[in-house]
Image (spheres, rainbow, N blue to C red):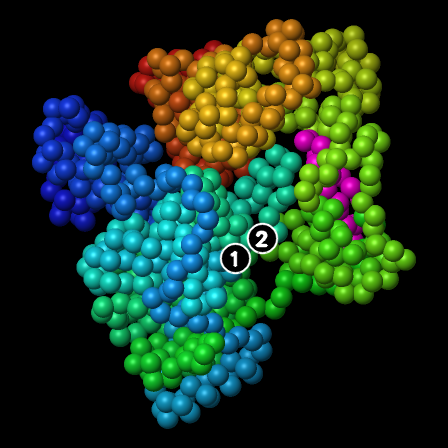
Amino acid sequence: MPSGVIPPADELRYASADNPYLAPEELAFAPVDSLDREAAMTQIEQLRAAIREHDHRYYIAADPIIADRRYDELFGRLEALEDAFDATAPTSPTQRVGGAPVDSLESVAHVTPMLSIDQSTEAADVRAFDVRVRDRLDSDAVAYTCEPKFDGLSVELVYEDGALVRAATRGDGDTGDLVTPQVQTIPTVPLRLSGDPPATLAVRGEVYMPIAAFTAYNRQRIEAGEDPFANPRNAAAGALRRLDPTEVRERPLSCFAYDILDASALPASQSATLAALRGWGFAVAERTTRVEQIDDAIAFRDGLLADREGLGYEIDGTVIKVDDRAQREALGATARAVRWAFAYKFPARTEETRVEDIVVQVGRTGRLTPVALLEPVDVSGVTVSRASLHNPDEVERLGIGVGDRVRVRRAGDVIPEVAAVVDARSDEPFGFPERCPVCDSPVRRDGPLAYCTGGLRCRAQLVQTVVHYGSRDALDIEGLGVERVEQLTAAGLIGELADLYRLDVDALAPLEGWGTTSAENLIAAVDATREPPLERFLVALGIPEVGPTIARNLAVAFGSVDALIAATVEDLTAVDEVGAIVAEAIDAFLRNTQNRRELAALRAEGVEPVAPDPQTGAALAGLTVVFTGRLAVSRSDAAAIVERHGGSVTSSVSGNTDYLVIGEDPGASKQEAAEAADVPVVDPDAFAAVLAEAGVEFPTD
């Protein structure tokens, strides 16, 4: 089939790697303005079908067959056609980007009540449930479907003629919050179903945040001076209640479907329901089984408990459901819970211990975070000796003090937290300080949060600001770790960011653990950042809410620091992925007098960020690269080349990585990760050849 020619829509279900539309090497679509409406609408429907297929392969089947840049070409073509012919549809893949903010969440009645289920952590209660079921049915011919009990947020998804028309939270079981625009941004929620679904269909699912994504998201929040979420469930629930869908899209949410609430045609069993949901394009948990004896259901739960940490998402038990739908209907429900299902829960991930001390940490933005130092205790196989108390309001709510017995909980890889005080043994509750414990500056309260007002005069803020400035995601200055920065600030060599560019060998070499070579290496690494890519410089400044993606968008939109400073909030919100909250944070940062002085000092030392080249900015769009080992240029310069041409550079290998580029003396961990994820491993020469095909030069000498 000629390149760029679209096959009939009914052939898309047979997608394979040799299909030139689903896996195009080149796309040569006719200009949009050369199409009449009939031809455009045909192509729009075919594009939507192809993109849905790719979304399913990527997000659900984990078996993508095209590179990101090819997907982006298809998506961009669809956007252009929909815009030119005013053909946007609610179920189009283009609608996942998020719509306009809503003023408030409306309440909506569910198609059918979303009831609870009885639960217990005791096997004896599970066996009692089995006895009740068999007694009520007056039959021993009962089979059960066993599924993970997800620890997320339950939602109702309503479809008509295969199209998503409504999404709502569980709420009180009878009514919930209408969150359709928010749910539309979740990649694993199909906007249009595959196969031959019923004309009307209401599905029950669970919105959650994968543990790896949650950990990365929490790290970003901590680095931005924000409270980390206590667990993935809170993060997911908080996301769905955001009024701006574009902000929901920034959170890495996913969704499992696990039951049919109502339909014009119902499968005969729960096991058939799960198979049907998969066939219609939903993500369904793999760890499910059908058993005929309750002891097998108990064993299934015990197996899930043993494998819990490796699942990649939070569960808190097993749901055991009568498989046959007719038997389920015969069993019925109480006003609160169904009689045909039971949750066999895991033991709580909490333990009791003693508070040995309470300290207040100072973050890069001046945020004061209280932390409880604990008598070490094992919580689900992890030794916990400290737990976040989050903010002054949480300290006051708990009424916690040194010496108290407390209950500590954890979920996944999050920072452990104190759930409650179980025995108050302190003379008095901890009093939150009114002055910074590091620099003695007054503490400013902002709602539930507290901030040191010392700015970079506060050594804690200064150290973390400098470390962030030189971190991998920022300017990647090798040799600028926490210990060295603390040493340099203690020696009086760094009092502001601009002092990095004033360092000299004579001052550095005599320091303990240094020497002439170490001093020269650091100074060379710092000097290499005098003309950084604008997007990396914006990340390095530590602007709240600005990570690599938003920084790149700002750099492309404004082209210089001066233009960004001159921008209004309205100008900022016009930039892709910058919502009102993010725009306000950027504007406040750039209006701050101290931040202005810091920028002026950096520029006085010759720091002049380089704007993305608009002519070559998209040559590497969609390319994701990881570097390891020594290259012909510094890693920050290598990353700048890729990013300047539209690609992205990350610090760790994942399934989204296109190449791992290995220089001299590489570490083994990234190579092992690349092999596990089937990511191509190339040397700098081979990588240079790849970039040369896109017209980009990459140094190898």
Considering only order in the chain, which callout, 1 or 2, is on the residue closer to the N terminus? 2
Residue visible at 73% across and 28% down in the picture: 461
Instruction: Assign the N terminus to one quadrant of the image.
Output: top left
Q: Which residue is identified by label 1? A: 314
Using the image, tell me which numbered label, if any, was put on residue 358: none
User: Is 541 displayed left or right of 271 in the figure?
Assistant: right
The residue that label 2 is drawn on is: 231
Q: Is residue 497 left or right of residue 36?
A: right
Q: Residues within 10 Å of mark 1 (few under 14, many from 20)?
A: many
Residue 199 against residue 23 in the figure, above or below = below
Determine the CA span between mark 2 and mark 1: 9 Å
Residue lying farthest to the right in this orientation: 427
Determine the secondary structure under disc 2.
Answer: loop
Q: Main secondary structure of the magenta part?
A: strand
Q: Position of residue 31 (x, y in %)?
A: 16, 23
Q: Amino acid at mark 2?
A: Asn
Pick the front one: 589 or 318: 589
Whether residue 371 appears in magenta in the rendering, the answer is yes
Looking at the picture, how far across and down is residue 661, in whole percent?
A: 45, 26
Q: Is residue 209 visible?
A: no
In the displayed structure, 655 sits above or below 644; it is below
